[in-house]
C-alpha cells in the first residue's frame, strides 16, 4: 500500500515540476538537504520552499482517511508526520525561508492555481 501511495505522490511532484518548467520558472533545487524537512522544491532566489504533501501521509482533512486495520498504528504515524511538518515550518521561518505546502489533491485538481500562487510568492512585493 505504501508503495502505491508513494508513487502517486511522486507523479504529482513531477507534474508540478513540469508546470514550473512550462511557466519558465527555472532555478529551483530539488530536495535540498540543507533545509529543514527537505522541501520538494526550493527557489533559492525567492527563498521559497515548496512541499507536496501526500494526503494520506500528512493527514489531509479532505481526503485522508485512516485504514481500518492497524488503526492506531497509522493514526500515530500520521500524527507524527503532521507534528514534524509543523516543526519544520517553524524552523524554516526562523531561517527566513518562506514555505508553502500543497496537498496532493490540490495539485491534481488545479495545478495552474498552485503554480500561480508560487509565482505570486516569488514576485517581489
Ligand atoms: Zn487531500
Image (cartoon, rainbow, N blue to C red):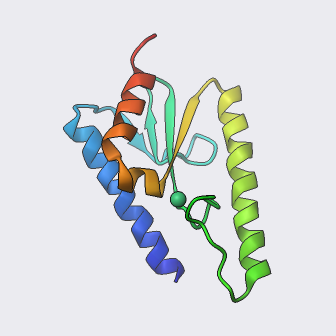
Q: Is residue 66 above or below residue 96?
A: below
Classify residue 100 as left or right of residue 109.
right
Q: Is residue 56 above or below residue 17?
A: below
- Residue at image location 53% in from the left, 78% down from the top: 2
Labels in figure, total:
0
- Residue at image location 40% in from the left, 23% down from the top: 120
Q: Is residue 83 above or below residue 23?
A: below
Nearest to the observer: residue 65 or residue 45: 65
**Residue 45 seen in the figure:** no
Nearest to the observer: residue 124 or residue 68: 68
- Residue at image location 68% in from the left, 43% down from the top: 88
Q: Is residue 109 above or below residue 87?
A: below
Classify residue 14 as left or right of residue 21.
right
Classify residue 87 as left or right of residue 47.
right
- Residue 82, percent from left and from top: 70, 55
Question: Furthest-bottom residue in view?
Answer: 69
- Residue 23, percent from left and from top: 23, 34
- Residue 52, percent from left and from top: 49, 51
- Residue at image location 45% in from the left, 57% down from the top: 105
Question: Furthest-front residue in view?
Answer: 62
**Residue 101 seen in the figure:** yes
Q: Say which quarter of the image contains residue 119.
A: top left
Q: Say which quarter of the image contains residue 60.
A: bottom right
- Residue 123, percent from left and from top: 39, 17
Amino acid at each position: 500500500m505504501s508503495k502505491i501511495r508513494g508513487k502517486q505522490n511522486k507523479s504529482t511532484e513531477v507534474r508540478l515540476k513540469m508546470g514550473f518548467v512550462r511557466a519558465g520558472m527555472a532555478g529551483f533545487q530539488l530536495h535540498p538537504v540543507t533545509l529543514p524537512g527537505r522541501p520538494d522544491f526550493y527557489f533559492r532566489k525567492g527563498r521559497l520552499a515548496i512541499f507536496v504533501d501526500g494526503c494520506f501521509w500528512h493527514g489531509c482533512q479532505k481526503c485522508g482517511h485512516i485504514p481500518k486495520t492497524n488503526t492506531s498504528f497509522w493514526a500515530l504515524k500520521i500524527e507524527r508526520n503532521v507534528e514534524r511538518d509543523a516543526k519544520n515550518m517553524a524552523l524554516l521561518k526562523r531561517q527566513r525561508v518562506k514555505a508553502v505546502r500543497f496537498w496532493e489533491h490540490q495539485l491534481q485538481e488545479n495545478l495552474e492555481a498552485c503554480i500561480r500562487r508560487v509565482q505570486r510568492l516569488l514576485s517581489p512585493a
